[in-house]
């Protein structure tokens, strides 16, 4: 099983745990090292109870091509000694792409968990990663019916597609007692239902000065009315410094936060503003209004069924949409089918049937 960046870690935890419990499949975990800062990596392993990786490739940062190429070469080097029956990749980061490519090159069956998401926006590196991973995959675990239908439209045979739910949510269900007991809101002096929680890190938003400036100006305006919490991703911090965009005084900035603290802050927020993928799922299950700063989402169920609104990145629109929620016009939602925290179990039962 290959993982490398923060959003991957939520998606491998239950699959590894269930494989170990079932005993028919022995997982070998490879951490590519795409994310290496303790707050983006070790903190997640620890809270999610993921065992130490069997291999750590240490690929580090670089252009997408450099990073992916180093991960491909690193994975390729360990395959002769590990001899896996299959390679499993999760999500859509560069490490996912690397695992998929190496499986295809070595003719090893490929399993993609969280398959079939599409935005058809080539400006998002994740979209390229998803499309290539799905082109090369043999077994597909889409999180939603919409994602499954994308795969069918692209010619994937239905007997290779397994509906198991949203893997990303398993840790949230499992760790809910710890999330509820977490004292971060009190430590930060936040009253439930009276603050906005936000995350921002997508290159389409952070790497264009005008867009980033507009978003931060909107955050500035909003933070004058309501407490505003922003854990700052290293990419965003770097770009704000490069573009000379100052952090508005009203925003409470933190380092990237561990998983339990992040979910706790989402769970009692008035609303969440994000460009993350996983947070759109999590807020839907938590029933918290979410404003997504993107033009497209690969997760349309979170809008059709859940509590998400896709609002783009225009400054005035962000301000207006926040006001709309503060005025009481909140998206009401339900939880999509099989988003119940038991996806890892279902995935592993299928894999045991195929490979066990
Ligand atoms: C990656 C994923 C993205 C995911 C995000 C979550 C890809 C294409 N993108 O984006 O889908 O939502 O992770 O965080 O795989 N850096 C550090 N410490 C680290 C890692 C990175 O400071 O441990 C800095 C480096 O300056 C690096 C930058 O963050 O250049 C971006 O890191 P990178 O892994 O390239 O992409 P992310 O933006 O994190």
Image: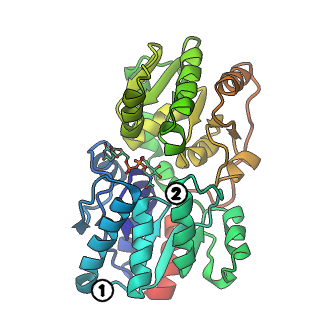
Question: Image check: 212 left or right of 116?
Answer: left
Of badges 1 and 2, the one in the foreground is: 2
Relative height, residue 151 to residue 10 (above, below): below
Please name whichever residue, 144 or 210, is drawn nearer the observer in this view of the structure. Answer: 210
Classed neighbour count for the residue bearing mark 1: other residues with Cα under 10 Å, few (<14), some (14–19), many (≥20):
few
Residue at point 56%, 45% (across, down): 282
Classed neighbour count for the residue bearing mark 2: other residues with Cα under 10 Å, few (<14), some (14–19), many (≥20):
many
Q: Position of residue 299 (x, y in %)?
A: 65, 53
Residue behind label 2 places its C-beta within 8 angstroms of ligand 1? yes
Distance, label 1 to label 2, CA atoms, is: 28 Å
Residue underneath mark 2: 126
Residue at point 37%, 68% (across, down): 2
Q: Position of residue 301 (x, y in %)?
A: 71, 52
Residue behind label 1 places its C-beta within 8 angstroms of ligand 1? no
Residue at point 44%, 23% (across, down): 245
Give the structural element (helix, strand or loop) at label 1.
loop
Q: Quadrant of residue 214?
A: top right
Identify the image quadrant of the N terminus. Answer: bottom left
Can residue 26 be seen in this snapshot?
yes
Residue at point 51%, 37% (across, down): 208
Question: Image check: 229 left or right of 82?
Answer: right
Residue underneath mark 1: 83
Identify the image quadrant of the C terminus. Answer: bottom left
Give the structural element (helix, strand or loop) at label 2.
helix
Please name whichever residue, 83 or 57, is drawn nearer the observer in this view of the structure. Answer: 57
Q: Quadrant of residue 94?
A: bottom left
Relative height, residue 22 to residue 276 (above, below): below
Can residue 86 be seen in this snapshot?
no
Q: Position of residue 168 (x, y in %)?
A: 51, 56
Q: Quadrant of residue 14?
A: bottom left
């Amino acid at each position: 099983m290959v993982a490398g960046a923060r959003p991957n870690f939520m998606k491998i935890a239950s699959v590894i745990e269930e494989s170990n419990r079932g005993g028919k499949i022995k997982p070998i975990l490879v951490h590519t090292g795409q994310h290496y800062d303790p707050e983006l990596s070790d903190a997640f392993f620890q809270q999610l109870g993921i065992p130490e990786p069997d291999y750590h490739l240490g690929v580090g940062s670089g252009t997408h091509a450099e990073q992916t190429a180093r991960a491909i070469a690193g994975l390729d080097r360990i395959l002769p000694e590990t001899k896996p029956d299959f390679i499993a990749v999760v999500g859509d980061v560069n490490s996912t792409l690397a695992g998929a490519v190496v499986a295809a090159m070595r003719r090893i069956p490929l399993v993609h968990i969280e398959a079939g998401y599409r935005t058809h926006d080539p400006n998002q590196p994740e979209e390229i990663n998803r499309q290539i991973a799905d082109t090369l995959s043999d077994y597909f675990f889409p999180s939603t019916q919409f994602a499954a239908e994308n795969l069918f439209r692209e010619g994937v045979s239905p007997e290779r597609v397994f509906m198991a739910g949203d893997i990303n949510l398993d840790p949230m269900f499992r760790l809910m007692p710890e999330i509820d007991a977490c004292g971060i809101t009190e430590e930060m002096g936040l009253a439930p239902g009276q603050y906005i929680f936000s995350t921002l890190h997508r290159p389409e938003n952070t790497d264009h000065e005008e867009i980033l400036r507009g978003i931060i100006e909107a955050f500035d305006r909003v933070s004058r009315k309501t407490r505003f919490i922003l854990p700052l991703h290293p990419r965003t911090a770097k770009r704000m410094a490069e573009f000379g965009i100052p952090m508005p005084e009203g925003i409470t900035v933190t380092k990237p936060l561990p998983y339990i603290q992040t979910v706790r802050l989402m769970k009692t927020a008035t609303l969440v503003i994000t460009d993350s993928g996983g947070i759109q799922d999590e807020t839907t299950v938590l029933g918290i209004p979410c404003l997504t700063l993107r033009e497209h989402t690969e997760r349309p169920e979170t809008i059709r069924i859940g509590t998400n609104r896709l609002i783009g990145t225009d400054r005035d629109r962000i301000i207006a949409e926040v006001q709309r929620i503060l005025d009481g016009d909140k998206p009401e939602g339900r939880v999509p089918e099989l988003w119940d925290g038991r996806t890892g179990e279902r995935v592993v039962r299928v894999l045991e049937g195929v490979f066990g």
